[in-house]
Amino acid sequence: MQVEGVQKSPILIASGLKPVKDSRAFEKLGLSLRETNKYSLNFIGFSAKSTFKQDGIRFFSSISHTKSPGQRLKMPFRFLRILLKIRPKIVICCTWEFLPFAKFFKPLLSYRLIYDVQENYRSNLNLNPNLSSWKKKLGKKLIRWAESGKSIDYFLLAESSYASEMPEKTPHLILENKYAGPFLSR
């Protein structure tokens, strides 16, 4: 995207099961980056619409039905298709499911990879009563594998406790997930 003769660097901010206009990915990260006037912004997230534009920002659907196992399996491949289409300079993954593709294609497309750690996914598996112990173990191994490696350039941590819970996630910046709406008085 070009504005006033200046080439803007494309950024891809990718969530899987969160809304395409998620309060953290879109409102906090995206709109803050837009203020610099250096980037063309592209978002992937949950949406019934497949692709749309708003105020020079492009939105892509990662999935339209969160309960559909078939769509959930296709989700990383949609991410890959959009990644290859946009060829961003920076990719911000807001979910661990996109990390394997993002890490694999990073050397080929030469972008910086930032992982926005919004949850402690491995610990959250312990809280799911519907998963058997072997599924929890498998899930933890899969998440650990996806989140590991030197391919991730930077981590954004949504909670200050994540720095001690996940000390391997360095370098990092604590960007707490605080309520951004108006305060209501009683």
Image: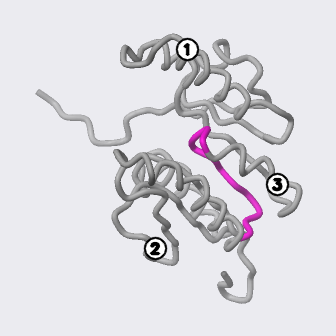
Of the 4 image quadrants, the one containing the N terminus is bottom right
Of the 4 image quadrants, the one containing the C terminus is top left
- Give the crowd class for mark 1: few <14, some 14-19, many >=20 residues within 10 Å: few
> Residue at the spot x=71%, y=75% of the render?
8
Labelled disc at residue 106: 3
> Residue at the spot x=43%, y=18% of the render?
131
Query: From the viewer's perspective, is the residue at label 1 or at label 2 nearer?
Result: 1
Task: From this view, report whether residue 4 is shown above or below residue 136.
Answer: below
> Residue at the spot x=69%, y=69% of the render?
10
> Residue at the spot x=51%, y=72% of the render?
57
Q: Which percent across, then down, holds residue 6?
A: 74, 82
Of the pair 13 and 106, the residue shown nearer to us: 106
Residue type at numbered disc 2: Thr
Specify the quadrant of the image occupied by residue 100: top right
Q: CA distance from mark 3 to mark 1?
A: 32 Å
- SS at mark 3? helix
- SS at mark 1? helix
